[in-house]
Amino acid sequence: VQLQASGGGVVQAGGSLRVSCVASGRTFRNYIMGWFRQAPGKEREFVAASGSSILWSGGTTTYSDSVKGRFTISRDIAQNTVYLQMTSLKPEDTAAHYCAARTYGRTWSQGSWGHGTLVTVSS
């Protein structure tokens, strides 16, 4: 599956931003879709994921503790798109945000990755 992320930009602390990721090439509903981010000088970290509760023990959505309650992941199956709605943004949320897709039973490193979209939160 090919992934194309977009929607990054500059936003003030406390503001909101939504990034999007369009998937193509495979059946979208068969994948767990995830968002990761990498801040300058830091390792890439998990942000959120969305899958089917029928097939995935993680349930329909899961979040890292650092974004829980502020970010929401959602998917539009008809549009083959996954979104990450970010609210109450903090300067420490500044990072390149990447979308990823993996099938059930595989790891993220075995999945597909898109190019990052940069989110900058100014204080």
Image (cartoon, helix red, strand yellow):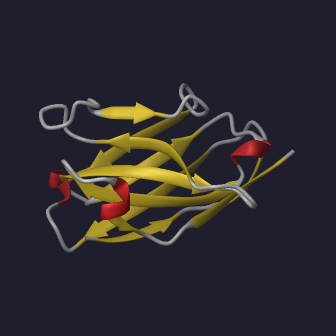
The N terminus - image quarter: bottom left
Q: Which residue does the image show at 46% across and 51% down from the upper left?
A: 35
The C terminus - image quarter: top right
User: Is 74 above or below relative to 58?
Assistant: below
Q: Position of residue 11 (x, y in %)?
A: 74, 51
Q: Position of residue 63 (x, y in %)?
A: 46, 34
Q: Position of residue 89 (x, y in %)?
A: 69, 39
Question: Relative to the observer, which residue lies in front, 114 or 75?
Answer: 114
User: Is 57 above or below relative to 10?
Assistant: above
Question: Relative to the observer, which residue lies in front, 102 or 5?
Answer: 102
Q: Quadrant of residue 16?
A: top right
Side of 6 relative to 57 (left or right): right
Q: Quadrant of residue 56?
A: top left
User: Is 61 above or below relative to 7?
Assistant: above
Residue furthest toward the right? Answer: 123
Residue furthest toward the top? Answer: 69
Q: Position of residue 43 (x, y in %)?
A: 63, 55
Total number of numbered labels?
0
Side of 12 relative to 86 (left or right): right
User: Is 1 above or below relative to 18?
Assistant: below
Question: Relative to the observer, which residue lies in front, 97 or 80?
Answer: 97
Q: Which residue does the image show at 55% across and 62% down from the upper left?
A: 7
Q: Which residue does the image show at 32% across and 42% down from the upper left?
A: 50
